[in-house]
Image (cartoon, grey):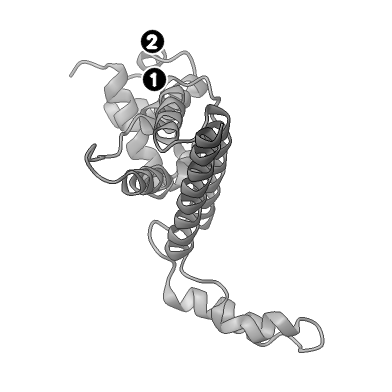
């Protein structure tokens, strides 16, 4: 079977997904494809170039947005799709977070983000700020899952163990942590949903205020 860049990237993604990023080498990719490692180098100069293109491919996945859906629904779906990139490819989380903004897929993501934010009525300056805030929110939550190794919600017993730790702290050392223990360490998906809704509400308030300012001018 003919070796090409897409087949190599498919193999690389499979290796990372099943064995982790440290297992990814040009030799390992060649073995996976039944090819000499030198054949891989004919398509990618080095492992760094291959990883950059693999990240670009992951970022290129598009959310399915209904253009007729309410603005908030489309924004929410866009943020969830972005965060799930990290959930689907845990060991590539750090790779994704460390990519240069010069990647074509990241330029497209930024353009689409600004387009969606200005659609609701933000000025371009406001849209640029919220675009960065959204990126920080998504990448931060995505890295939490990437570092923890959780593809899905953490096991209930893990969160309970963390709450017990706080509940057993000495009252004279951390009285508020002890009292709040039953409410600490909430479901991470719930936290992402809560923060996403806070951001959407803040964007809509800012856009409304901007519209009122224009109307008064």
Quick check: can you spot residue 211?
Answer: yes
The residue drawn where x is 47% and y is 53% is 201
Foreground of the two, 81 or 202 = 202
Residue 7 lies in quadrant: top left
- Examine the image and state in which quarter residue 4 appears: top left
Farthest residue in the front direction?
A: 216
Residue at label 2? 42
Which is in the foreground here, disc 2 or disc 1? 2
Name the residue located 38 percent from the left edge and 44 percent from the top edge.
Answer: 75
- Residue under the image location 42 percent in, 29 percent down: 109
Q: Is 44 on the left-hand or right-hand side of 168?
A: left
**Toward the viewer: 122 or 8?**
122
Query: Residue 163 at x, y = what percent?
Result: 58, 80
C-alpha gap between disc 2 and disc 1: 9 Å
Residue 58 horizontal/vertical position (percent): 37, 33
Q: Secondary structure at mark 1?
A: helix
Quadrant of the rendering where the N terminus is positioned: top left
Above or below: residue 107 compared with residue 11? above
Residue receiving disc 1: 37
Residue at 68 percent across and 85 percent down: it is 178
Earlier-in-chain disc, 2 versus 1: 1
Q: Is residue 13 above or below residue 145?
A: above
Instruction: Tell me: 139 left or right of 17.
Output: right
Q: Which image quadrant is residue 81 in?
A: top left
Q: Position of residue 202 (x, y in %)?
A: 52, 50
Residue closer to the observer: 158 or 1: 158
Q: Position of residue 131 (x, y in %)?
A: 52, 36
């Amino acid at each position: 079977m003919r070796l090409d860049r897409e087949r190599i990237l498919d193999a690389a993604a499979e290796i990372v997904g099943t064995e982790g990023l440290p297992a990814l080498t040009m030799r390992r990719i060649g073995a996976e494809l039944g090819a000499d490692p030198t054949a891989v180098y004919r398509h990618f100069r080095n492992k760094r170039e291959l990883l950059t293109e693999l990240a670009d491919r992951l970022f290129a996945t598009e959310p399915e947005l209904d253009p007729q859906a309410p603005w908030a629904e489309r924004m929410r779906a866009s943020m969830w799709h972005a965060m799930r990139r990290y959930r689907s490819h845990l060991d590539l989380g750090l790779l994704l977070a460390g990519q240069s903004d010069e990647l074509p897929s990241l330029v497209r993501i930024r353009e689409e983000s600004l387009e969606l934010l200005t659609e609701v009525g933000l000025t371009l300056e406001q849209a640029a700020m919220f675009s960065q805030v959204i990126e920080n929110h998504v990448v931060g939550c995505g890295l939490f899952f990437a570092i923890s190794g959780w593809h899905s919600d953490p096991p209930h017993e893990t969160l309970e163990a963390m709450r017990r730790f706080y509940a057993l702290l000495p009252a004279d050392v951390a009285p508020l942590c002890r009292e709040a223990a039953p409410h600490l360490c909430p479901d991470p998906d719930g936290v992402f949903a809560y923060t996403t809704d806070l951001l959407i509400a803040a964007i809509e308030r800012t856009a409304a205020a901007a519209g009122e300012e224009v109307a008064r001018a």
